[in-house]
Image (cartoon, helix red, strand yellow):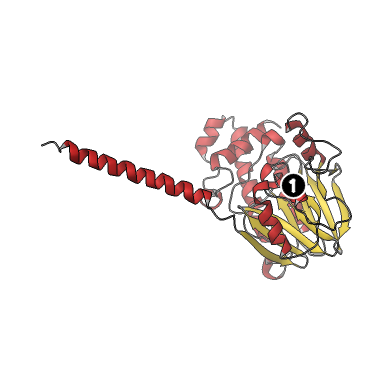
Amino acid sequence: MNEPNLVRRARTAFALLAIALVITSTLHARQNAAPPAVGLLHVQRSVHMLVVSGMNIAVQVGDDGVLLVDAATAAVAPQVIAAIRTLSDKPIHTIINTHVHADHTGGNESLVKQRGTGAPQPVRVMAHQSVQERMIAAAPAGGFRLNAVITLPINSTYDTPTKDFFLNGEPVVIYHAPRAHTDGDSLVHFRTSDVIAVGDVFSPDRYPVIDLATGGSVQGLIAVLNHILEITVPAKFQEGGTYVIPGHGRLCDEADVVEYRDMVTIIRDRVQDLIGKGLTWEQVKAARPSRDYDSEYDGEGGSSPDAFVEAIFRSLKAQ
C-alpha cells in the first residue's frame, strides 16, 4: 500500500531541513574556527621548535634578535609572531628558507611586516639562489621588485656549497643540498646549540617527496641524508646529542635519520635492480618495491608509496 502523499511530503521536508541544518552548522563552524594552535618545544640551548599547521619552524633567540628557519604560510603569521613573543621581545633578524615550496616560504612577507619595531636594519630573508630564481620566474609580471624587501620574498642569497655567519652567540652554517627534495634545499646547522634544521629532505613517518619538477632526485636525497649523518653526533645509547628539526613531524636525532636513509637507499636499490632487468614503470609498480615499508612511512602529507617509487624510477631513468 502506498504512503499517503502528506506523510511522504513531511518526510521529504524533514530530510531537507536536516541537510540545511548540517550545512549551516558547518559554515558557522568554519567562520568561527579558532586560529591554528601553535606548539613550542625547547630543543636545546638557544634553539626552539615551533609547530603550526603541520609544519616546523626552527627559532633561534638571543641578544641579536630572532632567527627563523622557514616561515610557514601567510595565514598563520599572526600565530607565529605571538608564539615568538613568548620567547623573545627582540625583532626578527633573519629568516632562512630551506627550499622554494609555499608552505615554507609563504609567510616571508607577512613575518617581515609583523616582525616588531626597534630593529636597526631590515629583516634578512635568505635562501639558495635557485630558490629566488624560481620565485621570480613564477611571479606575475611586476610582482616582485628586487630593491624592495617587503615585495621580494628573498633578499639575500648564496650560491656556494656553504654559507656561514655568527648570530646570537653561535656560528650558523648553511649547507646547500643540490638536487635532493628540490635543487635549492638548505640545511641550517646551529653549531653551539648542536641542532640542525633540514626542511623537507627529511620528515619522519612519511615517504619523502622528490620534486622532479624543481630539480629533485633520489641520488641527491640520499647524499644529503648521508651529509646530515656526517654532521650529527649521538649521545648515550644513540639517543639525543645532535637534534634534527625536520620540515614536518616530531623532533629527531641521528638514529631516526639513519633509519630513514636506509629506507630510501633500499627502495632505490630495488628500483634500480628492476630497471636493470628492463622492467617498465607499470611492471615496477606492480612489483611493489616499497611494500615492507608502506605501513610505517605512508604518512599524511608525504608521497604515497606509488608516487614515491615512481619519483625514484623517473629520477634514475633521467640520469
Disc 1 marks which amino acid? Answer: Asn
Q: Do we see residue 223 in this rendering?
A: yes
Work out whether 138 lies above or below 7: above
Q: Residues within 10 Å of mark 1 (few under 14, many from 20)?
A: many
Quarter residue 234 falls in: bottom right
Quarter residue 62 falls in: bottom right
Quick check: 138 left or right of 94? left
Work out whether 81 lies above or below 287: below
Quick check: 15 left or right of 67? left
Question: Measuring 77% from the left and 40% from the top, which residue is drawn there?
Answer: 131
Quick check: 128 left or right of 221? right
Q: Give the image location of residue 209, x and y in percent.
A: 63, 43
Q: Do we see residue 257 in this rendering?
A: no
Q: Give the image location of residue 308, x and y in percent.
A: 59, 41
Q: Give the image location of residue 319, x and y in percent.
A: 71, 32
Of 31 and 71, which appears nearest the observer? 31
Question: Measuring 85% from the left and 58% from the top, which residue is drawn there?
Answer: 118
Q: Secondary structure at mark 1?
A: helix
- The residue furthest bottom is 236
Q: Give the image location of residue 20, x and y in percent.
A: 38, 43
Of 118 and 100, which appears nearest the observer? 118
Provide the residue designation for mark 1.
Answer: 108
Of 39 and 231, which appears nearest the observer? 39
Of 309 and 197, which appears nearest the observer? 197
Question: Measuring 63% from the left and 47% from the top, which residue is drawn there?
Answer: 264
